[in-house]
Image (cartoon, rainbow, N blue to C red):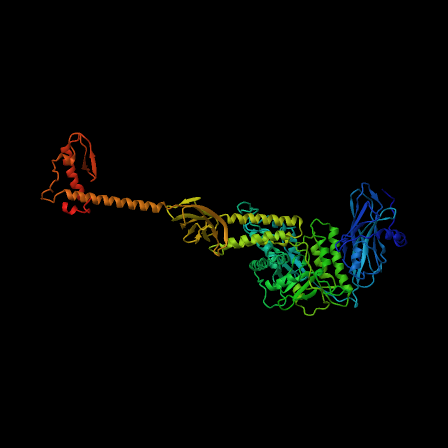
């Protein structure tokens, strides 16, 4: 497509095409506060041309000062196009309220929106396919006196093709400040400047990932926010909102650190100390010195979700740990001040700015909170208002004085959230900044004689495109209808102007952490508490590591479902594996079966500690059937790291047979640990029976010995006296039975009667036997009856 060049449209020529342009530009586009922020729209269906506004200088109009509007035109077709033009449109009537401003942003054109004389430019030459060309149009309010008093006016750039048809439009807003005695009262505005990240550290000393390295480097998200915040900290009276976990994670990076060490904390990539992290922390400390700062709970815990899940102890821990860490790293106290009606250290900012009365009551009762920042949608005015009320209000907290509430403007938050990526275009960044400025001017214009307050709270993990953050704060400090103050100044104000009665906070957010993740967190809590309870030497840092792991799972970073929630759930599973592995390092070692030599005996077992610190545990022994009992059913011992301690259990069985002895480790409070073991105990009474048999045998032996001794005494004469009558003589062969073919008895060498076979030498045996008899009488049986006479 091509056309002959034509002169610039002015006066009547511009008016001639106005009707056609208005008809084409009146298309309605539904949307919310963020919809239509970019302002680019195709007219009459599909078009070969797109137009955008990328800047305005200055950003608001004043008498005698030309506003230069700049933008781009892009040929989206496959053919070259010539003879394109861009002309501005506006109105002599400002918007009446913020709802009209929203309608315009959505594409619903009302009022006398029309072309501006002399505010037109023609693009020279030919625009090639998919090529983009910059355009610029000056707008002088004095030469084009369409602007009335203070307010916000519509402003659009329309692109025309060579046949004078409007084919594309980009809309924005033009605040106008007359600079006269009739100017409105200025509005107080306070910014919350968030430095909040996602959890980067759990139970390991290293980091889960190295995302912070790029974020704090030049061009990174946190680097940009800190740089802009430092520049405007004083002039814009910024109130910094800092997650202490971010400070702790960056502190870890200031020394050699590991990344992605896994559930066992034994692997990972080693990184050198980060000079960038050190510089970022130093710059933050410098920028916030003497400036208002409040800290979130550690890892920016989901305040509303933890309260709803009755996990108040976890929330309290997150606040306590967060304040301690921030105080240590930034070198200033963040402890809440008792009895203070409004202070930075007693401030909280629930995720999404949404909290109901139960959440607020819990914050006041448990965490020393006296001021909260909520989204304005949570507490709308009790009665409809013709203007935007002040951001200050209060609500009962159930504990005493009312809780101070500051309401961040919901529309402005949505507008800022619409540019939440570094890849957003320059046109998107401009449209957001201009819409922000227009919203603040519109709030002022709704009730120009009533001074009110505005609170701006960007998304807590805001990632604006380059230049947007700086432009927003520049507009804040330069707009003549705004006066920068801190959040704390607004919170401490008594009976502020423009305050209205508001509805009680009842809202809940569908983005809260789901019950499934909270259930996982609760289980991790139990495991962490159990592991903490067995430490024999506290303050080893182990408890801190366990707490870090649980708090990372409870972070608001995992809100909203989708990939964010999936990341949180994966972290919870990894943490659970670690905790289970730690529990598994405490074990009971013992034989599977033990046989007792009687109804009682000892069962040796060992308690093994594979953890890196000494543990104090109890060993409990029991039989659910009552067949075997331990003399001492509970043994408390301290086991050094990496060692075993032996315990000898004295047990008693109630009868013969086998019984199962159940062994279990418990913490010092008696709560069972996972470590268990069963030992089969086989009990018999063989031990007693053996003693009876031995005693009986010994008794028989003694009786036999005594009888033999008596018999010998009867048949032997006293020393030197005659033998008894009828006693066989030594030569009597019948005594020893050494006659031919005879068997006889003799006293053997051991003193027992022995059988002598035929053919033995009677004389030899007689002499040997008598000698042996004497010896054994003296040596072996001296204690037997009658032996005294033999001596």
Q: Position of residue 230 (x, y in %)?
A: 64, 58
Give the residue displayed 69% in from the left and 66% down from the top.
Answer: 393
160 or 518, nearer to the observer: 518
Q: Nearer the viewer, residue 277 or 36?
A: 36
Specify the quadrant of the image occupied by residue 177. bottom right
Quadrant for the C terminus, please: top left
Q: Position of residue 594 (x, y in %)?
A: 41, 45
Instruction: Measuring from the top left, give residue 227's x and y in whole percent.
Output: 65, 55
Q: Residue furthest front?
A: 726
Q: Which percent across, then down, holds residue 627?
A: 43, 49
705 or 323, nearer to the observer: 705
Q: Residue furthest bottom?
A: 495
Q: In this orientation, does residue 285 appear?
A: yes
- Using the rendered view, name the quadrant where residue 495 is placed: bottom right
Q: Which image quarter holds the N terminus? A: top right
- Left/right placement of residue 197 relative to residue 188 reads left
Q: Quick check: can you spot residue 586? A: no
Number of numbered discs visible in the structure rendering: 0
């Amino acid at each position: 497509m091509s056309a002959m060049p034509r002169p610039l449209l002015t006066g009547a020529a511009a008016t001639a095409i106005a009707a056609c342009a208005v008809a084409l530009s009146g298309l309605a586009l539904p949307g919310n506060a963020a919809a239509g922020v970019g302002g680019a729209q195709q007219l009459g269906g599909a078009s070969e041309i797109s137009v955008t506004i990328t800047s305005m200088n200055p950003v608001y109009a004043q008498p005698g000062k030309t506003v230069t509007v700049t933008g781009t035109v892009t040929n989206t077709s496959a053919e070259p196009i010539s003879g394109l033009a861009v002309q501005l449109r506006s109105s002599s009537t400002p918007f009446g309220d913020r709802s009209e401003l929203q309608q315009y942003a959505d594409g619903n054109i009302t009022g006398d929106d029309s072309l501006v004389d002399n505010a037109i430019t023609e693009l020279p030459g030919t625009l090639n396919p998919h090529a983009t060309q910059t355009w610029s149009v000056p707008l002088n309010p004095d030469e084009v006196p369409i602007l009335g008093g203070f307010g916000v006016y519509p402003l659009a750039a329309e692109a025309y093709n060579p046949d004078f048809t409007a084919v594309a439009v980009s809309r924005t807003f033009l605040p106008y400040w007359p600079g006269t005695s009739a100017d409105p009262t200025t509005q107080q505005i306070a910014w919350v400047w968030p430095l909040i990240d996602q959890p980067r550290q759990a139970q390991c000393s290293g980091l889960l990932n190295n995302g912070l390295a790029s974020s704090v480097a030049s061009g990174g998200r946190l680097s940009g926010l800190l740089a802009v915040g430092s520049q405007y900290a004083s002039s814009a009276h910024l109130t910094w909102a800092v997650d202490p976990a971010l400070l702790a994670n960056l502190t870890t990076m200031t020394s050699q650190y590991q990344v992605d060490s896994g559930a066992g904390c034994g692997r990972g990539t080693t990184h050198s100390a980060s000079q960038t992290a050190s510089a970022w922390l130093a710059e933050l400390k410098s920028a916030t010195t003497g400036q208002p700062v409040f800290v979130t709970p550690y890892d920016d815990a989901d305040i509303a979700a933890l309260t709803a899940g009755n996990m108040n102890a976890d929330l309290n821990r997150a606040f306590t740990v967060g304040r301690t860490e921030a105080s240590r790293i930034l070198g200033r106290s963040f402890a809440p001040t008792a009895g203070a009606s409004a202070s930075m250290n007693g401030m909280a900012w629930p995720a999404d700015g949404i909290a109901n009365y139960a959440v607020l009551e819990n914050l006041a009762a448990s965490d020393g909170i006296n001021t909260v920042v909520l989204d304005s949608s949570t507490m709308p005015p009790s009665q409809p208002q013709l203007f935007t009320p002040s951001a200050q209000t209060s609500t009962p907290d159930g504990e005493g004085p009312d809780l101070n509430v500051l309401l961040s403007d919901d529309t402005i938050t949505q507008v800022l959230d619409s540019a939440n990526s570094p890849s957003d275009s320059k046109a998107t960044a401009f449209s957001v900044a201009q819409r922000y400025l227009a919203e603040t001017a519109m709030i002022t214009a709704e009730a120009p004689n009533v001074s009110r307050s505005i609170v701006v709270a960007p998304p807590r993990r805001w990632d604006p495109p380059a230049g947007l953050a700086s432009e927003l704060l520049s507009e804040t400090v330069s707009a003549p209808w705004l006066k920068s103050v801190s959040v704390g100044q607004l919170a401490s104000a008594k009976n502020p102007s423009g305050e209205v009665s508001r509805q009680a906070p009842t809202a809940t957010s569908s983005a809260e952490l789901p019950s499934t993740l909270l259930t996982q967190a609760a289980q991790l809590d139990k495991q962490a508490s159990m592991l903490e309870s067995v430490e024999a030497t506290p303050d080893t840092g182990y408890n801190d590591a366990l707490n870090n792991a649980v708090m990372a799972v409870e972070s608001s970073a995992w809100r909203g479902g989708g990939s964010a929630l999936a990341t949180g759930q994966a972290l919870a599973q990894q943490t659970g594996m670690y905790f289970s592995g730690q529990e598994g390092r405490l074990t009971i070692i013992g034989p599977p079966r033990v046989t007792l030599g009687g109804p009682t005996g000892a069962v040796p077992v060992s308690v093994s500690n594979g953890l890196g610190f000494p543990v104090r545990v109890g060993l409990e022994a029991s039989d659910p059937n009552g067949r075997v009992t331990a003399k001492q059913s509970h043994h408390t011992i301290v086991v050094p790291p990496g060692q075993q301690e032996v315990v000898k259990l004295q047990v008693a069985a109630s009868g013969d047979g086998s019984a199962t002895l159940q062994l279990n480790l418990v913490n010092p409070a008696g709560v069972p640990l996972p470590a268990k073991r069963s030992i089969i105990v086989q009990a018999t009474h063989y031990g007693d029976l053996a003693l009876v048999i031995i005693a009986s045998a010994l008794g028989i032996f003694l009786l036999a010995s005594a009888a033999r001794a008596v018999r010998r005494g009867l048949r032997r004469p006293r020393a030197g006296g005659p033998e008894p009558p009828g006693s066989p003589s030594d030569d009597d062969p019948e005594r020893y039975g050494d006659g031919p073919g005879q068997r006889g008895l003799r006293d053997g060498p051991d003193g027992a009667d022995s059988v002598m076979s035929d053919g033995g030498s009677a004389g030899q045996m007689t002499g040997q036997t008598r000698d042996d008899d004497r010896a054994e009488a003296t040596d072996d049986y001296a204690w037997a009856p009658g032996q005294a006479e033999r001596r």
